[in-house]
Image (cartoon, rainbow, N blue to C red):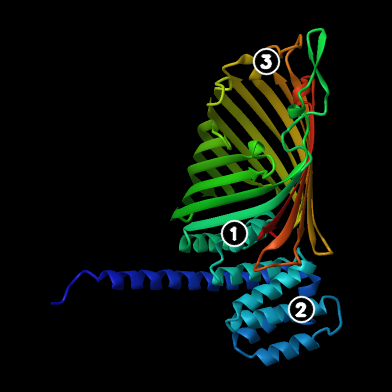
Amino acid sequence: MKTRGRLPAAGAAFLLSVSRMTVFLNSLRRIAALALVFLALAAAALPALAWAEGSVSAVVHVRRLVDAGRMDEARSFIRQWRAGGKGYKVRVLFVEGLIAARSGETARAVEIYRAILAAEPTNDVVRIELARSLATLNDADGVRAQAEMLRASGIDDRLGGAITRLADLVDANRPLRFRAYGSVLPSTNVNRGTDNETVPLGPIDLKINPASRRKSGVGLLLGGEVIYQQQFTPTQRFIAVGSAVGRIYPNARDLSSFNFDGAVGLERSFGGTRASIALTAAAGTSTEQVNVVQGGLRGEISGRFSHAPRWLWSLNGQIRLQNDLATGSRDGEIYNLGASFDRYFATGHFIRLGGRGEAARFRVERFSYDEIGFFAGYARPLPLGVNVYAQAGVAFRDYDGLYPGLAEGQNDTRYTGDLVLTKRDLSFAGFAPQLLYRYERVVSNAAFDDIERHEIEMRLTREF
């Protein structure tokens, strides 16, 4: 019997797959066309891919040869054009990447583009090709990382948002993703203890228990994340994220801790502006019990100043309800609001200025506080295959109520410093090694909270 108006399930699935692949390939063709336009627009700013003497761009010409399958002619042309001049080696290597991608050797093309970016991290034309090749490999995380870098530096805007749309398309093909990371975690203060020897109790100075003094140690940092995304329209998508992080100290199990976070929300784009809102949940545990649970609402909006396109801005806020299961003294609400401004000079090269405020109102008044903080950061790709990001911050926190032993409320000043180094020319299956260093110094009139800490993490990342 023949069936009209319906397809068998297998046939429908096959057509859906073919339809998605057709959309995917068409998008890649559009990206290629836009990349050609970008080459023409950017040629004057990129000496390595500059215009030839005459009316035809050398790079556009060689790309046409590659697209026509005339690989040997493409190699011969680029090796003879301005041989030995500035950027010669990069041009030759770039053409080898184009040939590899055109020949179906996409993984090799990715390696070539990564090698070029290790030497020239601000070469946006190569980064566009890298994003295209990663999309062909269906590498959602890799494409998204490159798209965000090109978007932040304004390159994707000049392409009409094409790279971001490509990343969205790859996300749609892989709506569910998993990430995991691990690191050795050396710290000079694993228990957030103090260096003070005594604590005042009125006119009496009491000796602090050795268990509350600072302890150094080496632990393990283990983390994972599950991400689900569903694109509703080209400008709107649903996002659900769940994550877990554990800090494990084998020689001090009572100091180990685990944190779980989840969020479900919507993200929407309005031209060059993005807005998102999400319901959040979190839990913090020790090795013995769940200590605290939270639930709340988080929102964020970001964009670019129309009259200052090199400046990006971001605003975010969150409201959390907290249940302190350990003692109940910190049951209450936490509110925070933050803002940051990035000024880009080139892809991966920017300064960052920002501030944040936080207020907590807990059941026991002396734990309630108001805090305001400021930070400044600087990122730059260095020529030795290293990306560096350095940030310094200061925050001022005033507590309500009286602290035991003090005639006034507790007040803290917290100084922080962060340094992130990424070795981009050492890539392992698309991941580069990354070193994170963090310094924290809290100056407090409460002896137990007067602390200092140095901490190091070592990870692998795709964000380079």
Q: Residue at x 66, y 60 (%)?
A: 462
Q: Which image quadrant: the N terminus? A: bottom left
State if disc 2 and disc 1 touch (CB < 8 Å): no
- Of callouts 3 and 1, which one flags the residue occurring earlier in the amino acid sequence? 1
Q: Please rate how many residues cluster around mark 3, counting C-alpha atoms within 10 Å: few if below 14, some from 14 to 19, many from 20.
A: some
Q: Please rate how many residues cluster around mark 1, counting C-alpha atoms within 10 Å: few if below 14, some from 14 to 19, many from 20.
A: many
User: Which x, y percent locates residue 322?
Assistant: 54, 27
Distance from Cα at disc 1 to Cα at disc 2: 26 Å
Distance from Cα at disc 3 to Cα at disc 1: 44 Å
The amino acid marked with disc number 1 is: Arg
Q: Is residue 140 left or right of residue 17?
A: right
The one nearer the camera, 225 or 361, is: 225
Q: Is residue 142 above or below residue 418?
A: below
- Of callouts 3 and 2, which one flags the residue occurring earlier in the amino acid sequence? 2
- Secondary structure of residue under mark 3: loop
The tag on residue 91 is 2
The amino acid marked with disc number 2 is: Arg
The amino acid marked with disc number 3 is: Asp
Distance from Cα at disc 3 to Cα at disc 2: 63 Å
Q: Please rate how many residues cluster around mark 2, counting C-alpha atoms within 10 Å: few if below 14, some from 14 to 19, many from 20.
A: many
Q: What residue sits right under mark 3 in the picture?
A: 400
Q: What residue sits right under mark 1 in the picture?
A: 144
From the image, state whether disc 1 or disc 2 is nearer to you. Answer: 1
